[in-house]
Amino acid sequence: MDAIIDLRRLGIASHELQICVIVCGLHRSGTSAVARLVNLLGADIAGDLSPNGPDNPRGFWESDAVVRIHDRLLKALDPSHDGSLFDPMPLWSDWLMTDAVRQAKRQLSDVIEKDFAHSRLFLVKDPRISRLLPLWVELLAHLGIAPIIVIPFRNPLEMAASLALRDHVSLPKALLLYLHAYLEIELASRVLPRVFVRYDHLLEDWRPFARRLSQLSGAQVSSPSEQVALEIDDFLTTDLYHHRFSREQMLRHPEIPAGIADMFDAMDEAEKSGDESKLRSVFDRLGANADGTAQLYRRYVIFELLDLRQQLMRMREAFESSTSWRVTAPLRWLKLWIRRK
């Protein structure tokens, strides 16, 4: 971060800086739509994009190489969790000091050099960055690249419904993920140029976001041509906006805590007005309450998972030593032999 601040103090104009737009939000919060919009507005994007999927037929707009690096890092940081993608608990306080992070920084630096060495403006998007944004802030500072953080967000009920359909994530887990992810994103980006963008507002009209991004980038994002504007309009349609809930439905829902509603309202106000004073106050309050309990819950969940795995291992050992297991052994060997043939 210091390297970026120093560049500005030296009076270097924004058009002389290399800028990285980091699209940083939760899964199913509109990160893909925002990334493609930023790309169409002029930011370069990686060449090894992840292929489209049935859950995202218009593309993820994220680098396969970056995703793989993030996946390896999250697994190294927390090997007790197979599903780091949806782990709602924050990482340990000293995770940035680990060898795994240092290795990931070297690998990500190589990707940036390979894909964006000659780019004045480029974008990086991966929902995993919602857990790893401090790493990217440090990396870009070291490389002398100025960051702009774009934070897509969505009504928590909409995000939870989408995660439940695609990934079978329970509502309590989705809400805990929402809480900790946006607390961490907000804290890590607080001193940096950033913009909040609400997914349904983006679909209604993308131009206010484009103007704000242009201001933050020192006009490196210029007004799109008529042809590009039509392409954006064709891309940002509501036909893939399947889960819709109003603020009133969120407030009436018995499982939505007041803190989650306050968080959504604070981001919504910051997006509309550009004034973050209320947002910072709300997030500071929520963060103070969450920090004290997060590690306790993490230890509880880890011990519960270890106990469950031990129980399953004991059950398997008991079954494998039973008569039925020994009697059916020849049949299992035959099936294995057939597969290999």
Image (cartoon, helix red, strand yellow):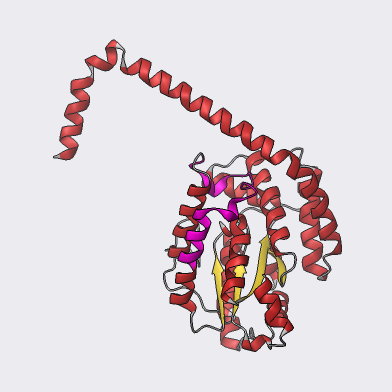
Please tell me whether residue 91 belongs to the stretch shown in magenta: yes
Q: Answer with left or right where residue 193 lies relative to residue 76.
A: right
Q: Position of residue 70 (x, y in %)?
A: 50, 57
Is residue 251 something one can see in this rendering? no
Furthest residue toward left = 341
Quadrant where the image shows the N terminus: bottom right
* Residue at 70% from the left image edge and 73% from the top image edge: 205
Furthest residue toward top = 323
- Comparing 240 with 259, the one in front is 259
Q: Answer with left or right where residue 38 lies relative to residue 67.
A: right
Magenta span? 81-108
Q: Position of residue 206 (x, y in %)?
A: 67, 74
* Residue at 45% from the left image edge and 71% from the top image edge: 110
213 over 219 or under it: above or below:
above
Q: Image quadrant of residue 170?
A: top right
Is residue 273 something one can see in this rendering? yes
Please tell me whether residue 249 belongs to the stretch shown in magenta: no
Q: Position of residue 208 (x, y in %)?
A: 73, 76
289 over 134 or under it: above or below:
above
Q: Answer with left or right where residue 181 lies relative to residue 100.
A: right
- Comparing 118 with 47, the one in front is 118
Q: Image quadrant of residue 38?
A: bottom right
* Residue at 69% from the left image edge and 85% from the top image edge: 218
Q: Answer with left or right where residue 5 lies relative to residue 41.
A: right
